[in-house]
Structure formats: structure tokens, C-alpha cells
Amino acid sequence: MTSDIYEAKIHELAARHPLLDINIIGNSRMGKPIYALTLGHGQASVLFNAAHHANEWITALILTKFAEDCAKHNASWYEHVTLHMVPMVNPDGVDIAISGKTHWKANAIGVDLNSNYPAGWEQAKAHKYSRGYTAPNPRDYVGSHPLSEPESMAMAAFTKFVDPALTISLHTQGEEIYWLYQDYAPLGATELAICISQASGYKLEEVPDESSHAGYRDWFIQEFNRPGFTVECGLGVSPLPLSDFDDIYARVYPLLVEAVLFPIK
């Protein structure tokens, strides 16, 4: 799923499924469009994203497949929920990773997009710098300042624009769900965390120290005081092989459905 293949795929989906809207919410460092897919027209808004990290590009496939499955029929929740999806936050990085640099997590200039958000950015910087990530790198460099990158800026601006009741970010490793920020859970987060854990079989875990600040989920919880989740799909070494797709999707699909329906339960 290079950025070109992804772009062609979502336009083909929109042509076949007129209920699916496509918008460009920004552009990457290399000028590639960052697309948002939208379904439904309800008052409650939900936002899913994937592929913040380049070598986790299988998550872009997962979320695009979910969009396709939801678009195939006019679901009852369309009247109550507006679902926004950004399947490929980091198109430049995905292309770099697929081209052969499989260790690459960052964007085109070596900034880890999921360490570039304002919540606890200084703490993240101190931690990453102590581990040697003080300059552009395939992973873990936090950038020169919060939201220094067009990709993270686009996600932050779009999130504020759609004002979602909750967010889910798809990543890979560990079959785990992170749902707290600094041991804090917004209203409704615990209930939904249990629901999506049961739906997927993924366990609820606390965020490791090295990843406990400056992520999209961290920023969303701090900024909006609403439930935000990081879902770590699959097991193994990223990038996960395509042969894992069916198993991952079978577990993530019901998790995402629970999240879409949660605002109207």
C-alpha cells in the first residue's frame, strides 16, 4: 500500500460508494495529500487514524478496508454518527518504508510524528534525547518543536475541526490498547476501553515510559478531555507481513464498530 496505490484505492472506493466522502486535510513534507474519508451525517463525531508510523503501514490497509466495509451499505448509525478516518497520516514515510527501509518510522525528514504533539512534548524530548535521538532519525526524534511537521499539524487542525467524541489510533505492536494519559481517564473512557478490549481480545495496558508523552492520543486526551485510544495491532516485527492481515482485521473490525456505536449507546 504505497501512497499512490492508496490514493487510487480510495478514489475508486468513492466512485463505487457515493456515501463515502473524501477530503484533503493537508499535505506531507513532500507535498503528498493527506486524505480523510467520511461516512454518515450524525451529530456525534468519531475519528480514526492510522499509519502515523511508516513501517506500520498495514494499519492503513486495515482502516481503508474498514471504510470500504462500512460504505457498502447505509448503516443505521449513519443518522446518528459521522465517522472520519485518516488511514495514512504519514504517506512519505510509508513510501520510504516500503521502498526497503523497513526500520523507518518517521516522516520524510526524520521526525517521529507520534512524538510531535504538544502534550508532554518537553518530557518526551528529554527522554528521547537521553537515548540519543537528538536529531532527525528513522525513529524517535521529536522534532524542533511541537507540531513542527505538516502531517501532525494537519491532524491537530482536523481533529479540532471535527470535534470528535473519541479517537482511535491504529499502530502495531503487541495486541494491546493504551487508554490513559498520565493515569487519567476521561469520562466514558474506562467503559469503552473494556468494550473494545472484549471485542478484540486485546489487553488493556499502561503506556510504556518511553512512549508516555507527545503522542496523538496524549494530546487528544489533554486537549479535549475525551476518550482517546492507541490500538497496537498484531505481534511480531514491523512491518508486519501481509499474511497477518486477515487475523488482524478480524479482531480490529469489531473493536472499531464498538467505538462507532459508543456515542449513541
Image: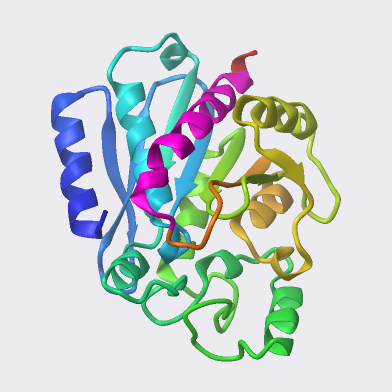
The answer to whether residue 86 shows anywhere in this view is no
For this orientation, the residue located farthest to the top is 76
Return the residue nearer the eye: 140 or 26.
140
> Which quadrant would the C terminus be assigned to in this image?
top right
Question: Residue at image x 47%, y 70%?
Answer: 105
Left or right, residue 65 beside residue 174: left
Vertical comparison of 245 with 21: above or below: below
Range of residues picked out in magenta: 240-263
Left or right, residue 212 beside residue 231: right
Left or right, residue 174 beside residue 69: right
The answer to whether residue 71 shows anywhere in this view is yes
Main SS of residues in magenta: helix
Return the residue nearer the eye: 127 or 197.
197
Q: Residue 145, how many percent across, how many down?
A: 59, 79
Return the residue nearer the eye: 127 or 254.
254
Q: Residue 261, how many percent across, how many down?
A: 56, 19
Is residue 77 magenta-colored? no
Is residue 257 magenta-colored? yes
Question: Residue at image x 49%, y 87%?
Answer: 136
Question: Residue at image x 33%, y 35%?
Answer: 65
Question: How many numbered circles are shown?
Answer: 0
Q: Residue 173, how many percent across, how many down?
A: 58, 55
Question: Residue at image x 50%, y 38%?
Answer: 47
Left or right, residue 206 beside residue 114: right
